Amino acid sequence: MTESVNDPIELLVQGRAHELGPGFAVRRVLPSIKRRMVGPFVFFDHFGPMVVPPGGDGMAVRPHPHIGLATVTYLFDGGIFHRDSLGYAQAIRPGDVNWMTAGSGIVHSERTEPEMRRTGFRMHGVQTWVALPKAHEETAPAFEHVPAASLPSWQDGAAALRLIVGTYGGRTAPTTHFSPIFYVAVEMAAAARTVVSPEHAERAIYVAEGTVMVGDRQLEVGDLAVLTAGMPVEMMAGATGAKAMLLGGAAMDGPRHVWWNFVSSSKERIEQAKSDWRDGRFAMVPGDPEFIPLPDR
């Protein structure tokens, strides 16, 4: 679509349904035909809100590999238990951040804990992948858990904001990052307003719950609005309030290829990763012997 120079929204992307596992549906927003990346964000999945009844499966993502990226998990509700090939075993709870740097290669699993499956629970969150700059694509893999209390949080009127990673509005999160980036969770009461800072070159708003007005357009759950560069943009929650993610950063240093769980600036590197996983050359996850086979396509 073509917009006027004064339109705060450059492009609108709608998430599409995708099944992560039996009974566990997500909205996949990035990559999209309309837009491959926003800043370094190359992948964006939104799951929930959903109520998993007692005895339900919840999340059961078997060990699988990554290269060339960092995964970022953020929850509004529920919990996920992370295990990886470095030996980390870490539960994530609402407001916390799990940042996993895949770099040259890592394997991890994400599962619902047995006690949560037994009692039932509400699940709502977002998982994103952040592409690493070319200079860091082969960095050593690492894992970092940042509790909610360690993240910058503040009020803007009736809007509560938490900086998950990067820099925003004069604040800096302690979370590891490799290029200019910002990622903010916003929870807004009915009719609350906040202005998206223009400091980063590429920015977007994603609506996770409720509705948000930007200019004269109402954004619904599943909408990712890529914002016009350099312009402060006011967002206002609808009558039931809203939950949203603000994300972006500097444009990446070139395109990225995405195949399955692999991200790289090099197609040859992805072919090597495919071969390494197929032939069992990745380290596996202690305590979780299952794995997802390499897909046919």
Image (cartoon, rainbow, N blue to C red):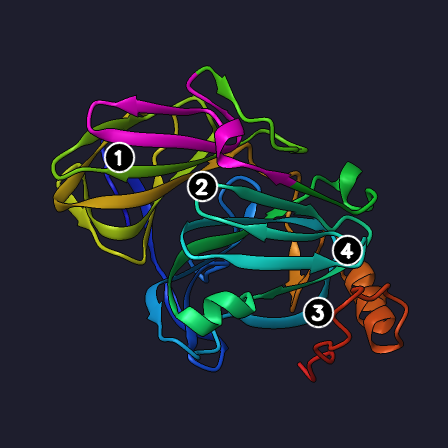
- Marks 4 and 3 sit apart, C-alpha to C-alpha, by 24 Å
The residue indicated by pointer 2 is 95
Q: Position of residue 178 (x, y in %)?
A: 68, 33
Q: Residue at x 42, y 67 (%)?
A: 26
2 vs 1, front mark = 2
Specify start and end residues of the magenta stretch as a single range. 145-169
- The x and y percentages for residue 58 are 47, 72
> Is any part of residue 35 visible from this angle?
no
Confirm whether the magenta stretch covers residue 154: yes
Disc 3 target residue: 63
Residue at x-position 16% and y-position 32%: 192
- Observer-side mark, 3 or 2, equals 2
Give the position of the C terminus as an image quadrant. bottom right
Query: 10 Å neighbourhood of mark 2: few (<14), some, or many (≥20)?
Result: many
Q: Are marks 3 and 2 in contact (CB under 8 Å)?
A: no
Marks 2 and 1 sit apart, C-alpha to C-alpha, by 29 Å
| Separation of residues labelled 4 and 1 (CA atoms) | 34 Å
Instruction: Using a 10 Å C-alpha cutoff, classify the residue at mark 1 as few (fewer than 14 neighbours), some (14 to 19) or many (20 or more).
Output: many
Q: Are marks 4 and 1 in contact (CB under 8 Å)?
A: no
